[in-house]
Image (cartoon, rainbow, N blue to C red):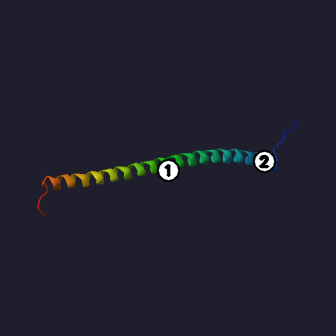
Amino acid sequence: MAEEHPTIGDLTYELLKKMNADLSEIKADISELKMRATATDEHLSGLFITTTGLNNRMDRLETRLERIERRLDLTEAR
């Protein structure tokens, strides 16, 4: 009995199936990376807001300290 050899069409079809499976895996990976990038962006935004708030509080404390120093006459002559 003669062995049946795959045709070019069969080989092409198998190659396309493999490429399609690989492409589906790449799409899933990209989707996951997009979600992680979004989460990172949100986290960085929160850190920025927190840092801004802390800087504002430090500015207010500095202003209050300067006022206290002036009232107690603790400031150096400029």
Q: Amino acid at mark 1?
A: Asp
Secondary structure type for disc 2:
helix
Mark 1 in CB contact with mark 2 (< 8 angstroms): no
Image quadrant containing the C terminus: bottom left
Q: Name the residue nearer the viewer: 62 or 29.
A: 62
Camera-side mark, 1 or 2? 1
Q: Alpha-carbon neighbours of circle 2 within 10 Å: few (<14), some, or many (≥20)?
A: few
Q: Residue furthest bottom?
A: 78
Residue found at x 70% / y 48%: 19
Q: Amino acid at mark 2?
A: Tyr
Q: Name the residue nearer the viewer: 78 or 14.
A: 78
Residue found at x 22% / y 52%: 65
* Residue under label 2: 13
* Residue under label 1: 41
Residue found at x 58% / y 44%: 32
In the rendered structure, find residue 7 and report the number of the disc placed on it. Answer: none
Task: Residue 59: give x, y in percent of width and height.
Answer: 29, 54
Image quadrant containing the N terminus: top right
Q: Name the residue nearer the viewer: 17 or 46.
A: 46
Task: Residue 6: give x, y in percent of width and height.
Answer: 81, 44
Task: Residue 75: give x, y in percent of width and height.
Answer: 14, 56
Q: Residue furthest front?
A: 71
Q: Residue furthest right?
A: 1
Determine the CA span between mark 1 and mark 2.
Answer: 42 Å
